[in-house]
């Protein structure tokens, strides 16, 4: 499932470039949005940008020609998404997913799961290594303890290695590892 780059909700998305131009004879003001957006957001930007350009876009030589380009561009982009499904009513955002993942991981680490295993699980579930690390750093407050005996890492609040029972010592900073 993809995420909309403006509302951050889980939804089918499409790459669009929509433009707006305001011409005031000797000056122009441009605005654009480019990215993978959901149908609701494309709708919103399309109407705002296109109507403003339609009424205020023409005044000025460069403005006149940019408006000639912008209006058909926006309209073609809009026509292309007419059949696209919109986001579901209660679609969760990427931020919801992030805190869900963070809570789940905190529980697993609390129960003594080694950081290496949890991290691999995240990557196997389809996250990039970077995103998995960000979630892990956030769930551990950036610190962990390493067991000298079995070479596994654990939540820094644990006193003993859940795997071999050895006392856990130094706290390691994620950024330094
Ligand atoms: Zn959106
Ligand atoms: Zn150990």
Image: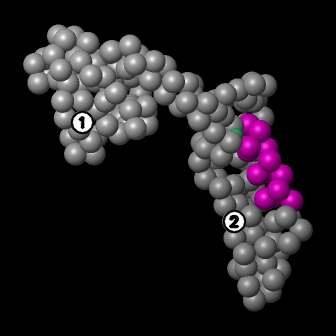
| Count of marks placed on residues | 2
Q: Say whether residue 125 is visible.
A: no
Residue nearest the viewer, comparing 42 with 126? 126
In the rendered structure, are the residues bearing label 2 and label 1 in contact, judged by CB atoms less than 8 Å apart? Answer: no
Residue under circle 2?
Answer: 31
Q: Say whether residue 119 is visible.
A: yes
Q: Quadrant of residue 84?
A: top right
Of the residues tagged 2 and 1, which is closer to the observer? Answer: 1
Q: Quadrant of residue 19?
A: bottom right
What span is in magenta? 39-51
Q: Which mark is residue 161?
A: none
Q: Position of residue 159 (x, y in %)?
A: 27, 22
Is residue 147 depicted above or below 39 in this figure? above
Work out whether mark 2 precedes mark 1 in sequence or the reverse, and give the earlier one: 2
For disc 2, does the CB lie below 8 Å from ligand 1? no
Q: Residues within 10 Å of mark 2 (few under 14, many from 20)?
A: few
Q: Residue at x 22, y 45 (%)?
A: 176
Is residue 72 depicted above or below 55 in this figure? above
Residue nearest the viewer, comparing 76 with 47? 47
Q: Position of residue 156 (x, y in %)?
A: 31, 30
Residue under circle 1?
Answer: 171
Q: Residue at x 23, y 38 (%)?
A: 172
**Quadrant of the frame with the N terminus:** top right
> Is residue 6 covered in magenta?
no
Q: Position of residue 21 (x, y in %)?
A: 75, 69
Q: With 171 as the anchor, is 138 left or right in this view? A: right
Q: Residue at x 74, y 85 (%)?
A: 27
Q: Residue furthest left?
A: 149
Mark 1, secondary structure of its residue: strand
């Amino acid at each position: 499932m993809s995420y909309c780059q403006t509302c951050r909700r889980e939804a089918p998305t499409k790459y669009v470039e929509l433009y707006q131009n305001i011409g005031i004879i000797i000056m122009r003001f441009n605005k654009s949005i480019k990215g993978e957006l959901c149908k609701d957001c494309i709708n919103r930007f399309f109407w705002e940008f296109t109507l403003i350009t339609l009424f205020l876009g023409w005044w000025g030589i460069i403005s006149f020609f940019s408006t000639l380009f912008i209006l058909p561009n926006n309209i073609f982009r809009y026509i292309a998404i007419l059949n696209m499904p919109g986001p579901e009513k209660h679609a969760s955002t990427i931020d919801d997913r992030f805190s869900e993942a963070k809570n789940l991981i905190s529980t697993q680490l609390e129960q003594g799961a080694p950081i290496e295993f949890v991290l691999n699980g995240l990557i196997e579930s389809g996250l990039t290594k970077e995103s998995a690390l960000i979630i892990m750093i956030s769930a551990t407050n950036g610190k962990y303890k390493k067991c000298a005996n079995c070479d596994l890492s654990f939540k820094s609040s644990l006193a003993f290695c859940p795997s071999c029972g050895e006392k856990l010592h130094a706290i390691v900073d994620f950024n330094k590892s």
